[in-house]
Image (cartoon, rainbow, N blue to C red):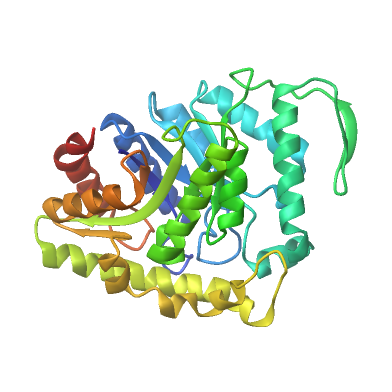
Amino acid sequence: MRFGITFFPAVGPGDLPAHRYFEDALDLAVYADERGFHHVKTVEHYFFPYGGYSPDPVPFLSAVAARTRDIRIATGAVIPAFAHPIQLAGKLAVLDNLSRGRLDVGFGRGFLPDEFAAFGIGLDESRARFDEGVHLVQRLWTEEDVVADGPFHRFGPVTLLPRPFRPEGPDIFVATATSPASAEAAGRLGRGLQAVPAIAGRAGFSEILAAYRRGWADGGRTPGTEQVQISLAAFIADDRDRALELGRHDEQLYSDKIAEATGAWARNTSTDYPGYENLANVGALLHFDTRLGEDHILAGTADDVRAQLTRLGERYGTDVTVSLTIHSGNLPIDVARRTLDAVADKIAPEFA
């Protein structure tokens, strides 16, 4: 089991100025590199305090790449539906070279109706745009004189510059919130999986993980060689009650922000998103104690969290990489730094 960090801002200008958030996040990314963490990752979202401070992962991750040496750089995730594939492939290739091949690219379909509406894209085009976008980005990384003639993009012949750091390009991950079908397709194509177990719940995520591993095997790959990243909020302190107090405060604010962002599902349905209308109530469903009991929030002393991770390993496999969501912007940076220290000093060595 390996450990990385994820930045998912859940603040707006009334909570924390953007420059302060980025300064704190950069400091933590550099510290995570010094402490031997596996990766640093951030998201793509728009307009809402739920993720809106990160409308494009590439600028922030470029700054991280310039200030670090060993830690991997990951998008979690970029959304092909919202960008032209030439533009997306090009800026990711720049980041790949800036990091000297440390880039892992997570792609996602997006899931917020208001974001799709702002870009003038129908929700029912989501899956087709995702499939075409990822396919074209990968071709642009690995081929020359690329010609595209799809339903959404027509261009070429085009040879992308710069070329990626490696001829095969960065490793590709697929982000999914609740879709076993997306996970199975990712496995079949040999792509990694990025997921947030707290969104799907224990039973739902177990189904997603089983589908991914089934697809991986069906694609002719050796079981046990999959690449799985799971994102979990983490709050560790010497005093258990203090850790739980911090976790409840931060997660309540996060729940409020996601409820605002997903509220449009009360007015939308889509064949590409079956059942997503239930996300209109997701904020009310994200009970801290429920997620803590499922080990989908890590909170308590280092011993408590070590026990949680042991249970997660038994449930989901010890080959998963855990992305610790450590800084939403709603708690002081020192809280996140203490969590990183606890993981590096008291937890990670037990799972090496």
The residue lying at 41 percent from left, 39 percent from top is 40
Residue 141 picture quarter: top right
Q: In the image, 167: left or right of 343?
A: right
User: Looking at the rendering, in which quadrant would you find the N terminus?
Assistant: top left
Residue 297 appears in which quarter of the rendering? bottom left
99 or 309: nearer the viewer: 309
Residue 249 in the image: x percent, y percent? 29, 71
Give the quarter of the figure containing the C terminus: top left
Residue 74 appears in the figure: yes
In the rendered view, tell whether residue 269 sits above or below residue 247: below
Query: In this picture, is 223 found above or below 109?
Result: above
Residue 284 image-quadrant placement = bottom left
Horizontal and vertical percent position of residue 71: 39, 30
Residue nearest the observer in this picture, 123 or 91 = 123
Q: Residue at x 44, y 48 (%)?
A: 22
Residue 167 lies, with reference to residue 204, above or below; the image says above
Q: What residue is drawn where x is 62% and y is 37%?
A: 189
**Image position of 195 with respect to 10: above or below:** above
